[in-house]
Amino acid sequence: MIVKKIGDSMITPLGFSVEENFAAVMEGRSELRRYESLWNLPFPCFVSLIPDEKLEAELARELSADVIASLHTKFEKIALLSAVKAVKQSGIDPTSERVVFILSSTKGNVELLADEHSDLERVTPAHTAQLVARYFQNPNMPITVSNACISGLCAQIEAFRCLKSGQYDTAVVIGADVLSPFIVAGFQSLKALSDEQCRPFSANRRGLNLGEAAAAVVYQVAEDNVEGWQMLAGAVRNDANHISGPSRTGEGSYRALMSVLCESQLKANDLACLNVHGTSTMYNDEMESIAITRAGLADVPVNAMKGYYGHTLGAAGILETLLTMHAVDSGKVPATRGFDELGVSMPVKISSQHIETEKNAFVKLLSGFGGCNAAAAFINPNLK
Amino acid sequence: MNNDVKHRVKLTPNYLEVDGKLMAEAVAGESFLTKLYHIYNMEYPKFFKMDVLCKVGFIASEILLEAEGAERFVPRADRAVILFNRNSSLNADRTFQQTIADPDDFYPKPSVFVYTLPNIVTGEIAIRNKYHGESSFILLPEKSQEAMNQAIERAFLDSETTSVLTGWVEAVSDTEFEAALELVVSS
């Protein structure tokens, strides 16, 4: 029995379909831009925002006026919209008791706290997950994974286990986060933001860019030897080192990578690429270069997507996994947009150009606050 | 799959229970969490920097691991930390929101912001105990033992995981909190 991808969707500043997003990445486009005082914040920031007018137009195409009116926030809108598109594409019956909904988000509706009249019950992402599951008349309690920046990969690992354990046959996995003064001011207070284009793994990198996105993927159990992308393995490991900084030895990322290589039985030579976190902060990219090298993957092409979308928080793990699947399907490892001159201590194979590949598998890596790290392996065995 | 619950700790603003036995009760006007920190000689000054969600999870996990009685602080990767609640990091979120609400009094602090993620408490427990295994925080729309049991069963699908420190940890204010933690071992 395998776990197979049967549908996906992307709601981002680069478009509301997978095709538009993949084309934009291949063309090297981004909607990351500098705002001098976004939401009257007292500092400039460089972020990527989903335009409200385009989002409303897309919602009107996919959802009834009553449903749209019932959604209170942009977060609820993009989470539901991404789920609707992925469910439609997959053709599943979402009302089945064999289907589970899984949401990945770091801050969900936190913007509601800025209004003292808000319903505090609605702030938690668990509320949004229930709203989405109810829209589809799904009878099961939805699962929300909130593990900082690794949430999107954790949610897929949770889906993988839901299917492997026999608890469910199908999992709809949604990753979403929007930006707000709360999130932007928080990352600024950590001195983690760059006010110019992020430059993952580069010598002159100065921090990360934040971005808005939702992405959804539908996984289903299938017989062995069917066509399409499969998830092979996933692991979550902790640095046990610091709550807001990565381990200098890349301990958790190294352990997660080793677990995934062992479980998937993939070798370095089988991998088209290692799609990494690559936030463009000094510590993250340096840590990843060490973990990659320790795991024996220094010869595998490495790429990061943050230069196209910024760090999309709870969406990142799903959006970046899906984009890598579509890229590998077309024989490409996407360029690391923003990369120029290598600025990490270990010589990882990273490129500012798209490169050709004939391989059919990859590993996705993420790390986050709380010392958490996640890795997962994917393969499309029919690709030649 | 049958997994064994080895020990249970229940911590509320009013009392502490270990394996169903009442161990301590709060007295009006005292900080129950700080009192337990001292009673159990935890000697971990980072405790005082934590937000209330982390304090509640930390104290309950310390007492749970004392009940286990195994050697502490030996690096290991076979124990996962998987915690649940409904309201994520709501209390820390409200504290941080207050620091950015007024443009004339704008003072966002990294030491507050870092606690605006629910999984920080799983990281605090991993750091304290040198646990390199899985750490995860799952939000549920309501407390459901069935949903938690399913997630614990799934956690054992990781071939390195042989035990899970798990349970419900909620803290919506400094005086409204609950931890109901268990140590679950694969059988």
Image (cartoon, rainbow, N blue to C red):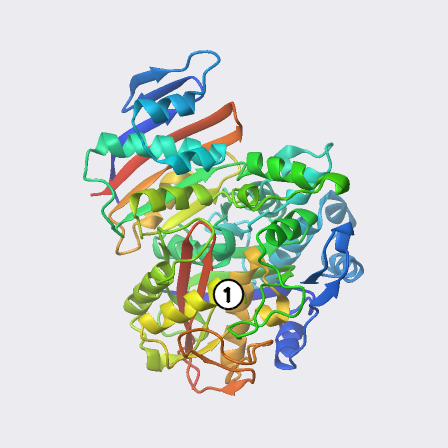
Residue that label 1 marks? A282
Residue B143 visible in rendering: no
> Mark 1 falls within which chain?
A
- Where residue A46 sits: x, y (%)? 69, 63
Q: Is residue A298 above or below residue A92?
A: below
Q: Is residue B57 above or below residue B109?
A: above
Q: Residue at point 39% right, 25% down?
A: B11
- Indicate the amino acid at tag 1: Met
Left or right for A334, reference B135 = right
Name the outermost residue toward the top.
B28
Q: Is residue A206 above or below residue A72?
A: below
Q: Residue at point 67% right, 38% down?
A: A113
Q: Residue at point 31% right, 31% down?
A: B42
| Picture quadrant where residue A209 is located | bottom right
- Where residue A204 sits: x, y (%)? 57, 73
Left or right for A151, reference A39 = left
